[in-house]
Structure formats: structure tokens, C-alpha cells
């Protein structure tokens, strides 16, 4: 089996590699090395990237037999060759902070929220911890975040080793090992002790910081979204830029942005109420005009604004008229059909005939139907043709 150099030194950035075999994994050609510093995807941690003999390493996976496969984006070095290998350090460093941060947050969630970790995932763009509690109150999530960051501030040592069975039996492991032998343990000071084969920081301060981004219910559990290290700094920078931009646009200080937004919300709510009142007044005036100009039991009309359809239809129906209204929109002709009490008009059936004849769509019941027909349709003529 390949010797895993990252177990002894997670900070190893480059090494000499001897190719022992060409193989295949998941339908892709791969290279097997005598020893590797590349971490294969496992335990929720993403695989390393880098280069091998000048060829890009695009994936690293371990099979069921423990063989580590290096998938290359190019020609593989010959078996027996010794080549230079380099790990994408920026990517690895992010993974180390995220993985160590996950251990820290998982223990903090137990201490502050009585929430045991069921599984964790460290993705390309997001990281999650699923805990066996639903829900977890926000105040307890905040307490867990604060506790984890206090351990980061204390800059405690992070140790990774393979304890002898007797020592392992006496360790306060947060969870049971997934393997029966050669159990690797990672301890963050005396705060958390967990079995893990991943790459980790050497001290807690190297995590930088941990930030809980939110939580949601998930299959009877709570899924907690978090970030740490360089990703947390990047997110903080993005949020800071967004806040500064809002402050400039609102011509206020960053501290006053929430108040300025609340003021805009109130103004928008007032404007919407004013607009609704104007629409009601306009609908009332239009209804009076259309009823006065109608000699039959129905009103067929084309309106200038889709927002008038329903309030006008309600007033016309209340006035004892069947209603067949249309409005020209960029997406086509929006139509509404509604009948008054005691009418025999089947709005749904008529709209289906209109849609079939014009290539539109829509539906509804006998009392009321809505749909969309092609643009530039002659609405009164289309209604007459559908009834013919």
C-alpha cells in the first residue's frame, strides 16, 4: 500500500515520487505511487490537487483495498520513474483549516447545544455539519461558535498520532472509530479528541476563525452551514464590501444601513398602499364607464394595466355583468374571464376554446378562468369567433 506522507507531515508541500503502477479508478486512468503527500477524498474532506512530473493531478481517490489513485490530466510517467510532485498548497491549507475547524465546532456543538454530529461535509463552496437535534436554537448556535473561537484564540496544540490499543481505549473519543485497527487520532488540546485520517492544522490559531452561517431542518436532523480560515476571511471581505456599497448608495454610514433600509421598506409599503388605492379608484371609475356603455349582460374590454384585471372584474361582477378582460403585456395577452351570480357563462370552457384557436394557454372553472394568449390579438373578435 502507498505510504501516506501527509499523516506524518500535513505541511509537506512537495516530494519525490516513485511510480509503482498504472491503474484505473472509476473508469479513469490513474497512477499509483510508493509514497504520496496527496490526500485522497475521504471523511468529508475533498481530495488534494497539484502536479506529478509536471502533469496536473486533477483527482486523488482511495479504493476499497486502500490503494491511492492519482488521476492525471495528461500522460502518466512510466512505471519505476521518480518524479517531482507538488501539492496545491492554497487548496490544502483551506482544507486543513476547514477540517480542524469542523472538529472544533462539532465538539462545541456538544458542549453548548447538546447536538451530536452525525456527519460532516467540506465542499468546494460550502461546509455543513448534520447534528442529531432538531431544531437547534440560534442562541445555542451562537454559543457554540463563540466557544469554538475561544479555543482558536487560546492557540492550543493539535496533535495527530496512531495510539497503541491500550492508549486508544483510554482516550475520550468524541465518536467511535470507523476502522478496527491502525486508528489515527486527532486531539485539539484537551478540548476534542476524535479518530480521523484527514489533514489538520498544527495549532488551533492556524484555523483563524469559525463562522456559523445558518441552520436548516434536514431529514429529522439539523444541518449547520459554517466556514473557517481563508474562506471565512473571504466571506467577511465580501460582506464588508457589500455593506460599504449599500452605505454609499444610501448616503449613510455602515452602522446606519439597517435603519436606512427600514425607512425604505416603510416608504415602499406606503407607496404600494397608495398605488392600490389609486387602482381601486380607477377600477371603480372604469367599472362605472363600462357598465354605462354596455347594453348587454357582459363587458368585453381591453385594459392598459394587468393590475386592474382583478379589481375591475370584481366590481363588474358585483354590478351584474359577465366579464371578459384582456391586457397586452410583453409576454403576450393576459386574459381574465369571470361570470356574475346566476350567469350560465362557462368561463373555463370558453377560455379553452380561445387558447386552442389562438395557440395560447390557460384554464379555470365555470365561474372564473385566466390565461395568456398570443400578443396583438383582437380580443373582441377572438371572443366572438370562439363562440361561433
Image (cartoon, grey):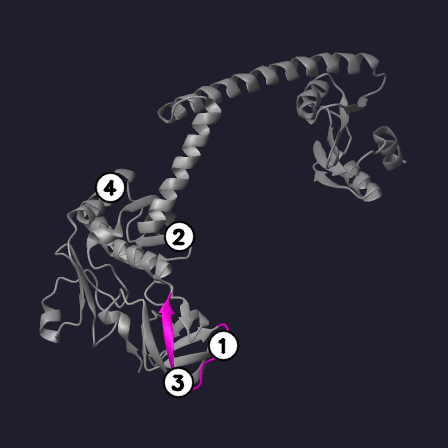
Magenta stretch mostly in which secondary structure? loop
Q: Looking at the image, which residue is at 80% across and 22% down?
A: 299
Number of on-image labels: 4
* In front of the other: 237 or 86: 86
Q: Say which residue label 2 marks.
A: 126
Badge 4 element: helix
Q: Say which residue label 3 marks.
A: 81
Q: Which mark is residue 140?
A: 4
Give how far apart the Cα atoms at labels 4 and 2 are: 21 Å
* In front of the other: 183 or 109: 183
Q: Is residue 346 above or below residue 195?
A: above
- Which one is earlier in the sequence, the residue at label 4 or at label 2? 2
Quadrant of the image containing the N terminus: bottom left
Q: Are marks 1 and 4 in contact (CB under 8 Å)?
A: no
52 left or right, relative to 136? right
Residue 211 lies, in percent from the top left, at: 30, 45
Amino acid at each position: 500500500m502507498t505510504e501516506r506522507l501527509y499523516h506524518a507531515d500535513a505541511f509537506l508541500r512537495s516530494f519525490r515520487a516513485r511510480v509503482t503502477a498504472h491503474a484505473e479508478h472509476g473508469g479513469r486512468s490513474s497512477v499509483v505511487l510508493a509514497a504520496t503527500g496527496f490526500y485522497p477524498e475521504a471523511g468529508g474532506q475533498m481530495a488534494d490537487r497539484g502536479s506529478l512530473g509536471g502533469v496536473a493531478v486533477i483527482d486523488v481517490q482511495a479504493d476499497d483495498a486502500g490503494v491511492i489513485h492519482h488521476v492525471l490530466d495528461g500522460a502518466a510517467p512510466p512505471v519505476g520513474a521518480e518524479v517531482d510532485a507538488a501539492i496545491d498548497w492554497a487548496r490544502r491549507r483551506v482544507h486543513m483549516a476547514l477540517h480542524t475547524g469542523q472538529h472544533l465546532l462539532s465538539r462545541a456543538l456538544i458542549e453548548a447545544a447538546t447536538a451530536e454530529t452525525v456527519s460532516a461535509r467540506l465542499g468546494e463552496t460550502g461546509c455543513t455539519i448534520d447534528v442529531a437535534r432538531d431544531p437547534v436554537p440560534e442562541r445555542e448556535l451562537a454559543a457554540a461558535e463563540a466557544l469554538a473561537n475561544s479555543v482558536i484564540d487560546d492557540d492550543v496544540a493539535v496533535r495527530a498520532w496512531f495510539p497503541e490499543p491500550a492508549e486508544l481505549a483510554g482516550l475520550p473519543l468524541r465518536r467511535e472509530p470507523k476502522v478496527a485497527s491502525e486508528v489515527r487520532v486527532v486531539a485539539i488540546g484537551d478540548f476534542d479528541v476524535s479518530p480521523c485520517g484527514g489533514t489538520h492544522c498544527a495549532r488551533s490559531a492556524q484555523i483563524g476563525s469559525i463562522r456559523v452561517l445558518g441552520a436548516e431542518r434536514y431529514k429529522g436532523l439539523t444541518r449547520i452551514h459554517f466556514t473557517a480560515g481563508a474562506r471565512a476571511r473571504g466571506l467577511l471581505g465580501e460582506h464588508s464590501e457589500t455593506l460599504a456599497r449599500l452605505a454609499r448608495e444610501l448616503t449613510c454610514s455602515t452602522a446606519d444601513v439597517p435603519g436606512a433600509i427600514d425607512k425604505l421598506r416603510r416608504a415602499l409599503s406606503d407607496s404600494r398602499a397608495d398605488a392600490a388605492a389609486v387602482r381601486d379608484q380607477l377600477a371603480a371609475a372604469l367599472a362605472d364607464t363600462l357598465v354605462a356603455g354596455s347594453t348587454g349582460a357582459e363587458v368585453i374590454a381591453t385594459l392598459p394595466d394587468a393590475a386592474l384585471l382583478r379589481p375591475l372584474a370584481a366590481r363588474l361582477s358585483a354590478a351584474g355583468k359577465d366579464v371578459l378582460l384582456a391586457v397586452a403585456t410583453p409576454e403576450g395577452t393576459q386574459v381574465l374571464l369571470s361570470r356574475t351570480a346566476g350567469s350560465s357563462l362557462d368561463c373555463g370552457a370558453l377560455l379553452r376554446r380561445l387558447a386552442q384557436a389562438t395557440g395560447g394557454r390557460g384554464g379555470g372553472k365555470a365561474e372564473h378562468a385566466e390565461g395568456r394568449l398570443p400578443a396583438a390579438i383582437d380580443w373582441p373578435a377572438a371572443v366572438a369567433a370562439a363562440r361561433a
